[in-house]
Image: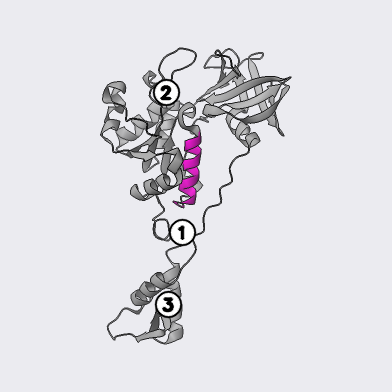
Amino acid sequence: MPKIFISYRRDDSKYQADRLHQSLMRVGRVPKRDIFIDIDNIPVGVDFVEYLDGQVKQCDVLLALIGPDWLTVANPRTGQRRLDDPKDFVRIEIASALKRGIQVAPVMLDGTPFPSEDNLPDELKPLTRRHGVDLRRESFDADAERMIRKLKLATTASGQGKPGDGTPGWIAPAIAVVLLAALGGGVWFGNPGDWRGLKADADPLAIAEEALVGALVLEPMAAEVTPLTLAEMAERELSGSWNVTGEADGCAAGQRLEVTVAGEQLMVGGEAEALVENGADGWIETLRDGAALRYKREGAQLLIQSKGASDMQAFTRCS
């Protein structure tokens, strides 16, 4: 079965990535363990370029989600375009897949134009020679299903049935053998009144399986996917120890900002804030003493902003 890597930017296509993840499991019957997403919890002391490369090389296809801000989003601390940073996770992921000859499918979101070669770093220029697929908000489910079929992302390995049918491949032959034994060498086609005997040189298993596949309807068993609650989303995105200095390395005493989730509250440095909602562009909004705050994880950084303000604070995950 295919192993799939979803490459995306949180501040560009976070929610589309989550929804596509669910579609791959529900429509494509792809097991959760075969979908790589959110590869940013890099172990301490590990070369993150080698780590990301190692994750990508395990996959058969990389889906590069490209939204309206994918090309231009900048690091809020330096003002540098993220794509121009050799340490940018998205750049590393896609470059690794292209270098290894892994299938890379650009997924263009909501009519986003395909990036031109001139706007891409050298190692990503081959991306412009890959055919892309469209994924739009108003037709997301239909577009996702079409993409899964087009890219052959549904489970197809032996014992997993045909793409998207949700039926283990051994069921029809097994039923065929049982029916043939019980019916003494004949088989019904369509209804009990349409009985045919088998020719001497006929393959009973093939004939019975053909009849069963055509006449027997087995309801697909959809993977049950439960959307994350706001508290679960905050736990996944925001929890951890963050370096208040913004430096990339270390986190000495007095430099840590501890963020945890307790019930429906976000605990920030020991202060409780009420979780309010998932805001626009991936921000999680809270209230503290009547003041509205916004939080968002972006790669290895935690961004904190007073709602309505233009400036923000950036913290780096403690190593």
Q: Identity of the amino acid at label 3? A: Val
Is disc 3 surrounded by few (<14), some (14 to 19) or many (20+) residues within 10 Å?
some
- Say which quarter of the image contains residue 69: top left
Tell me the CA gap for discs 3 and 2: 56 Å
Tell me the CA gap for discs 3 and 1: 21 Å
Image x and y of residue 299, in percent: 50, 25
Image x and y of residue 110, in percent: 41, 34
| Dot 1: element | loop
Work out whether 98 lies above or below 34: above
| Dot 3: element | helix
- Disc marking residue 88: 2
Q: Identity of the amino acid at label 1? A: Gly
Q: Say which residue label 1 marks.
A: 166
- Say which quarter of the image contains residue 271: top right
Q: What residue occupies the far left of the structure in this picture?
A: 129
Residue 57 at least partly seen: no
User: Any magenta on residue 166?
Assistant: no
User: Who comes first in sequence, dot 3 or dot 1?
Assistant: 1
Q: Main secondary structure of the magenta part?
A: helix
Image x and y of residue 43, in percent: 52, 29
Residue at point 56%, 51% (across, down): 224
Q: Say which residue label 3 marks.
A: 177
Q: Nearer the viewer, residue 292 or 229?
A: 292
User: Who comes first in sequence, dot 3 or dot 2?
Assistant: 2
User: Any magenta on residue 25?
Assistant: yes
